Image (cartoon, rainbow, N blue to C red):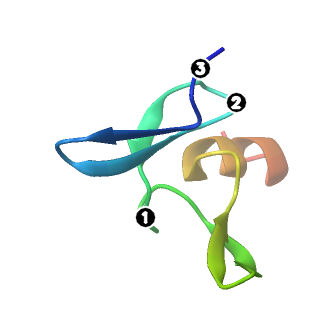
Amino acid sequence: MSKIYINTELGTEKRCTRCGDYYPLDTDFFYKNGVWRGKIQWTSHCKACFTETYRGDK
C-alpha cells in the first residue's frame, strides 16, 4: 500500500487517489476542503482528476 504523504526535497507531497501520482501539497495541485481541528483538509483527488471526475471537463 502506498503512503498518502511523502517528504521530498520539494517539501510534503500528497498522492492523488485517482491517478496515483504525487504532487506538492499546496493550492496549485489540490483544493482545500475545509479545516478540521485546526488542520487544513485537502481533497483526495488532484485538481486535474477532480475537474475530470466531478465537472466532466475533458
Look at label 3 and name its amino acid: Ser
Query: Where's residue 45, x and y in %?
Result: 67, 45
Residue 5 tag number: none
Q: What's the mark number on residue 18? A: 2
CB under 8 Å between discs 3 and 1: no
Which residue is pictured at 56% across the width and 28% down the height? Answer: 3
Mark 1 surroundings: few (<14), some (14-19) or many (≥20) residues within 10 A: few
Which element carries disc 3, helix, strand or loop?
Answer: loop
Task: Give 37 or 26, whichever is nearer the viewer.
Answer: 37
Front position in the image: 39 or 14: 39
Residue 49 versus residue 54 in the image, above or below:
above
**Residue 21 location (% of width, % of height):** 49, 28
Name which residue type carries label 2.
Arg
Nearest to N terminus: mark 1 or mark 2: 2
Q: Quadrant of residue 42?
A: bottom right
Is the N terminus in the top left, top right, bottom left or bottom right quadrant? Answer: top right
Question: What residue lies at 21% left-to-right and 48% top-to-bottom?
Answer: 10
* Rendered-image quadrant of the C terminus: top right
Left or right relative to 39: residue 26: left
In the picture of the structure, the residue carrying the numbered disc 3 is: 2
Which residue is the site of mark 1?
26
Which residue is found at the position 63% from the left and 77% from the top? 39
Q: Residue reaching furthest left? A: 9
- Observer-side mark, 2 or 3, equals 3
Residue 2 location (% of width, % of height): 59, 20
Query: Label 1 vs label 2: CA separation?
Result: 17 Å
Q: CA distance from mark 3 to mark 1?
A: 20 Å
Provide residue 16's location: percent of width, then percent of height. Answer: 60, 37
Helix, strand or loop under label 1: loop
